[in-house]
Amino acid sequence: MSERNIIAIVDQRSATAPANALPRIPDTLPAPTGLLSDALGRPLRDLRISVTDRCNFRCSYCMPKEIFDKHHQFLPQSALLSFEEILRLARLFVAQGVQKIRLTGGEPLLRKHLERLIEMLAALRTQDGAPLDLTLTTNGSVLARKAAALKAAGLQRVTVSLDAMDDAVFRRMNDVDFPVADVLAGIDAAVAAGLGPIKVNMVVKRGTNAQEIVPMARHFRDHHGGQVVLRFIEYMDVGATNGWRMDDVMPSAEVRRLIDAVFPLAPLDASQVGETAERWRYRDGRGEVGFISSVTQAFCGDCNRARLSTEGQLYLCLFAEQGHDLRSLLRQPHPSGRTYTDAEITGAIGAIWQDRGDRYSQLRASQPPSTGPSGRRIEMSYIGG
């Protein structure tokens, strides 16, 4: 398949509940206990917040240039949640059990004054009084000059997306001629700032960058003394603009065999419930790698993640077709003319999560291989990974 063979289907940013349908607020509003569970018994522990729909890369699997060109209309500033609105919602999610917040995009470091938001979120505490696990995912393009300030603001860790060590391959994949050396410099700066252990995510697409698997493993096992964990992600059928085909997916098991043949591996236990990556260590003790197998090995069974879009839509799955409009509860008046209270919004969040039954990847795995996505799914560039 050509890298240019991509067709836009629909703008997913408004794939929400029916017009004017506010989230349901329960008749009774019990105080949150942090023990909220969904319809399948999964707790709410991880909130991913997209702070911008803009990115300075045009990776074909996420934000292809043919769709996101100079004519593409990004969200106006007025549509984005303000930092104060993000903080309010984050605080209410924490009351319902969230322990980890990841800032995403687009490219989150393009959001002006992001350090101020990080300072605000870093002051939150879980139900047990512990600081949040506050992290950020970035393409690394401006990380070199921002790493120290991010750490000073209270950010704990970063995850960097990097799909190749070879400069020509990387420039071709980001499609804006951005050099790999600048991303590597950003990773170095993040290590120096103490934003570790740093995770580096490589999306593997057969026929595009599979030849970079071993060079990536070699580089990161030889640098930073185990402070960088490389993770390989199966090319996923998120959204509808990336021309996804099952033939382009390189299963994690195949990736692992390639690495193991050069650098022998041994399995590790998961570090926490709901972890997306299967962990392996190098047998010679030089760090670890991870494998995220959302296509061939679904991990929906213990998924504890919710996603908040930059305009305040709550999504319960990366493959969701519909969001829940929390922004309206922040900005629109109650029918009585007053504003919605924290208790009402917390109750609405609880009701949404309790009704959650999403397990897209498990259902897909039980069906014949697909040649492409169907339905009105949100785009990766809109909701983050």
Image (cartoon, rainbow, N blue to C red):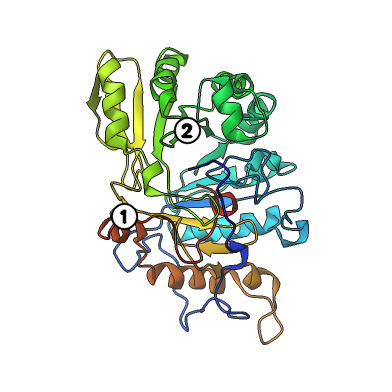
Note whether 13 is above or below 219 in the view shown: below
Question: How would you rate the neighbour count of disc 1 (Cα within 10 Å): few for under 14, some for 14-19, many for 20 or more?
Answer: few
The residue tagged 2 is 208
Residue at image location 61% in from the left, 19% down from the top = 181
In the image, 260: left or right of 327?
left
2 or 127, which lies in front? Answer: 2
Q: Is residue 87 visible?
A: yes
* Residue 207 locus on image (x, y percent): 43, 33
Q: Are marks 1 and 2 in contact (CB under 8 Å)?
A: no
Q: Is residue 263 visible?
A: no
- Residue lying at the far left of the rendered structure: 266
The residue tagged 1 is 369
Question: How would you rate the neighbour count of disc 2 (Cα within 10 Å): few for under 14, some for 14-19, many for 20 or more?
Answer: some
| Element marked by disc 2 | loop
Q: CA distance from mark 1 to mark 2?
A: 21 Å
Note whether 197 is above or below 367 in the view shown: above
* Residue 270 locus on image (x, y percent): 28, 38
